[in-house]
Amino acid sequence: MRKSTTFISAVLTTFALVTLYGVVSAYRSISTVTEASAMAMEIDTPTTAPTLEPTVEPTITPTIITPEQAAQLAAQVVGNSNLLSAESANLNGTDAYKIVFINNDVVYVGLTGQILTVQIAPVVVNVAPPAKTRNRNRDNNNNTNVASNNGGETENHDDHENHDN
């Protein structure tokens, strides 16, 4: 073998042995500490009955939701997923999230997830005015509605006759 290969092999072997020694030493020190603490507990065991401390009932703290969760809840309530904004707001002295949708619906969601108010935007219908029609026959002197009289002859269509008796 070459000298460089032998040198690298020796260095790696030394590194592995030193690491293994460190692991074994750490394990032995942990196991001796555990045995010493177990012996100390046996020695310090009181002969009297331990006093019971009063149990404290856990208090229920409300879970505060995120703006994203408030937006999802508002989308379910309104039935619209087209969200415009979600922001912090104060509604009648209560901290809340103001969720605004594209169609201007507004939902206020409390920090604990309750729906405080829903404001549905009024429906606005835009009606376009009727389109103006242009008179396309301006050059015909507005004679489009006049019937011709066949060369100037007139016809009399009177159904009642005047008879003098």
Image (tube, rainbow, N blue to C red):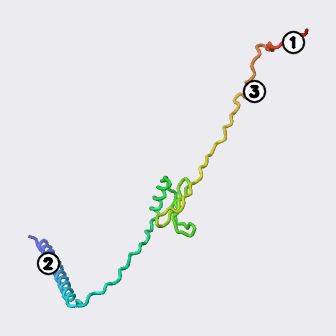
Tag 3–tag 2 contact (CB < 8 Å): no
9 and 94: which is toward the camera: 94
Depth-wise, is mark 1 or mark 3 nearer the camera? 1
Dot 2 amino acid type: Leu
Q: Which residue is mark 1?
A: 162
Residue sitting at x 52%, y 68%: 95
Residue drawn at 66 percent across, 41 percent down? 129
Residue 148 - label: none
Q: Is residue 152 visible?
A: no
Q: CA distance from mark 1 to mark 2?
A: 143 Å
Residue drawn at x 16%, y 77% is 15
Of 148 and 111, which appears nearest the observer? 111
Callout 1 amino acid: Asn
Dot 3 falls on a residue whose secondary structure is loop
Q: Is residue 130 left or right of residue 31?
A: right
Residue 140: image location, x then y, percent: 74, 25
Question: Mark 3 sits on what residue?
Answer: 142
The numbered disc on residue 17 is 2
Per the image, label 1 sits on a secondary structure element best described as loop
Residue shown at the point (78%, 13%) measured from the top left:
151
Q: Quadrant of residue 34?
A: bottom left
Task: Give whichever of discs 1 and 3 has the lower sequence position.
Answer: 3
Q: Secondary structure at mark 2?
A: helix
Identified by mark 3, the residue type is Asn
Q: Position of residue 158 (x, y in %)?
A: 81, 14
* Label 1, label 3: how far apart the Cα atoms are: 36 Å
Quarter holding the C terminus is: top right
